[in-house]
Image: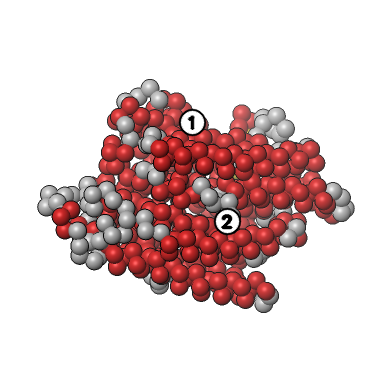
């Protein structure tokens, strides 16, 4: 049974190795290897989850060298759930968008696409499991490079410009993060999260280095906020998601930004400590920017006529929801924010894949006027888009409803200025969500543009399989959220 402790390390190393191997394989072989890797990560993460639920958290010393020479992997319930969920979303995003890769990517570059997916998978797993800040930073950069490659791989002017914007903003965030980690190392002399927390706790108890510690928290927080596209650092997001392939847009919106936020939560709990972090008042900044992002993202989405850019701007609003939850500075707020990570990832990836399916039967157009009637021409994509839209609005039975319910509960936990603002903005944001998502649903079911109809059209087995699984997942999160909520609460207690 203890052999399961090796699973996180094996998955990270195998993902890195698969990236190297895929570079010399054909497109078909590279695709098969990547799907096998993601399936392996899915099943091993499930094994780690069962193990941690039964026996509790564990650490794994890579190379069996203790600190400061070695570094560690840590697995608890929350890490296992996050790795399992990331692997599942990656698998379904690749399945749903698999048929479009040949259409969107030149043949010589198709195996390179799976190289980037392998590297991205390794970085996601490493950011989830690492207990070492230096290792975390290394994989933050691997994540950045792989994500940039996924954006620009279509090799047209729009994708190249989008990738350039992404890299400029992301590297700015990386630089601030690195400065913060460097100052932290200078202050404590440690890189392992548990050792850093012990040192910072001692400093806080004696009231020493208060200002440097506040600067460190600010640099790390702003760096990760830029990389996760928190308002007003979101300028790159709409183009990056809007001009990527279907699978890339689904993965970037659902996994990449969420991995950075999860790293921030780990730093909040396992490095700085919640008491010190919340006392620094950075949570007030998170709250204000999160609320602003909820409104700005929704207003920007309403103005869009391109459906994929509308979905992309919706992500700005949804990231605002997560940061608003973190901004409450309470355990319930963090629990609600983590659940919204799952809810948004499951829904937004489905929306991007479904949107590509609707575009396929509409002359590859993305404007609302050209997508009219697309829900009839591709019924599977139409149903999936409708489910995703209802979830984003917060209709009961869907995942988004549970997210907004828990965020409202977190807001009402304490009667203060945050409560009033949060409840009002949640209500306004829900109305705005309804305006642009219901408009989109009405549009795809308005019978027009019948000249695009193809009597022989079939969406494809992999597309249907991915979409159906996304729909089922959304209903499960909406109807049976209690086990996941309990797992999040157990995981956060282990963090503490």
- The image quarter containing residue 450 is bottom left
Is 372 left, or right, of 152 in this rendering?
left
Quarter of the image that includes the C terminus: bottom right
Residue on which the image places disc 1: 16
**In the rendered image of this protein, does residue 472 appear above or below residue 118?**
below
At mark 2, the secondary structure is loop
Q: Is residue 157 visible?
A: yes
At horizontal 35% and vertical 24% (from top left) the residue drawn is: 25
Disc sitting over residue 69 in the figure: none
**In the rendered image of this protein, does residue 190 appear above or below residue 396?**
above
Question: Sequence order check: which comes first, mark 1 or mark 2?
Answer: 1
At mark 1, the secondary structure is helix
Q: Position of residue 446 (x, y in %)?
A: 24, 66
| Residue at the extreme top of the image, as rendered | 24
| Image marks 1 and 2: residues in contact by CB distance under 8 Å | no
Is 21 left, or right, of 223 in this rendering?
left
Q: Is residue 401 visible?
A: no
At horizontal 38% and vertical 41% (from top left) the residue drawn is: 39
Within-10-Å neighbours for mark 1: few <14, some 14–19, many 20+: some
Q: Position of residue 110 (x, y in %)?
A: 34, 31
**How is the structure coloured here?**
secondary structure
Residue on which the image places disc 2: 231
Q: Position of residue 142 (x, y in %)?
A: 54, 35
- The image quarter containing residue 351 is bottom left
Q: Of tags 1 and 2, which is closer to the observer?
A: 2
Q: Position of residue 63 (x, y in %)?
A: 61, 29
Is 368 left, or right, of 286 in this rendering?
left
Q: CA distance from mark 1 to mark 2?
A: 32 Å
Within-10-Å neighbours for mark 2: few <14, some 14–19, many 20+: many
């Amino acid at each position: 049974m203890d052999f399961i402790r090796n699973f996180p390390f094996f998955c990270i190393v195998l993902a890195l190795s698969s990236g190297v191997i895929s570079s010399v394989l054909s497109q078909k072989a590279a695709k098969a290897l990547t799907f096998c890797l993601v399936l392996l990560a899915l099943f091993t993460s499930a094994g780690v989850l069962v193990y941690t639920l039964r026996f509790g958290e564990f650490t794994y010393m890579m190379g069996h060298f203790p600190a400061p020479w070695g570094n560690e992997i840590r697995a608890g319930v929350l890490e296992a759930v996050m790795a399992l969920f990331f692997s599942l979303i990656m698998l379904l995003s690749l399945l749903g968008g698999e048929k479009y890769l040949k259409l969107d990517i030149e043949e010589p570059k198709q195996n390179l696409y799976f190289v980037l997916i392998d590297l991205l998978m390794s970085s996601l797993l490493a950011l989830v499991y690492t207990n070492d800040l230096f290792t975390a930073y290394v994989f933050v950069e691997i994540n950045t490079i792989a994500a940039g490659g996924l954006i620009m791989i279509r090799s047209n002017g729009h994708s190249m410009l989008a990738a350039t914007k992404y890299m400029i903003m992301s590297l700015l965030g990386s630089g601030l993060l690195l400065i913060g980690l460097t100052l932290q190392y200078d202050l404590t002399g440690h890189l392992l999260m548990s050792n850093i927390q012990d040192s910072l706790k001692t400093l806080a108890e004696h009231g020493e280095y208060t200002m440097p510690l506040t600067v460190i928290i600010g640099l790390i927080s702003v760096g990760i906020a830029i990389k996760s596209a928190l308002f007003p650092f979101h300028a790159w997001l709409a183009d990056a998601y809007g001009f990527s392939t279907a699978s890339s847009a689904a993965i970037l919106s659902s996994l990449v930004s969420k991995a950075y936020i999860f790293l921030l939560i780990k730093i909040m709990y396992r490095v700085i400590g919640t008491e010190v972090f919340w006392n620094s008042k950075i949570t007030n900044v998170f709250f204000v920017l999160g609320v602003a992002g909820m409104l700005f993202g929704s207003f920007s989405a309403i103005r869009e006529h391109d459906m994929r850019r509308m979905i992309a701007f919706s992500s700005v609003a949804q990231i605002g929801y997560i940061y608003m939850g973190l901004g409450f500075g309470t355990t319930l707020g963090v629990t609600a924010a983590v659940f919204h990570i799952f809810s948004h990832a499951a829904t937004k990836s489905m929306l991007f894949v479904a949107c590509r399916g609707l575009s396929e039967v509409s002359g590859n157009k993305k404007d609302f006027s050209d997508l009219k009637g697309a829900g009839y021409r591709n019924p599977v994509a139409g149903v999936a888009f409708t489910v995703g839209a209802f979830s984003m609005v917060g209709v009961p039975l869907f995942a988004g409803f549970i997210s907004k319910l828990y965020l409202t509960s977190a807001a009402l936990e304490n009667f203060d200025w945050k409560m009033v603002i949060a409840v009002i903005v949640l209500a306004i944001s829900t109305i705005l969500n309804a305006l642009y998502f219901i408009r989109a649903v009405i549009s795809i079911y308005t019978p027009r543009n019948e000249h695009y109809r193809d009597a022989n059209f079939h969406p494809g087995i992999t597309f249907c399989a991915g979409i159906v699984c996304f729909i089922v997942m959304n209903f499960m999160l909406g109807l049976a959220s209690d086990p996941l909520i309990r797992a999040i609460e157990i995981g956060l207690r282990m963090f503490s």
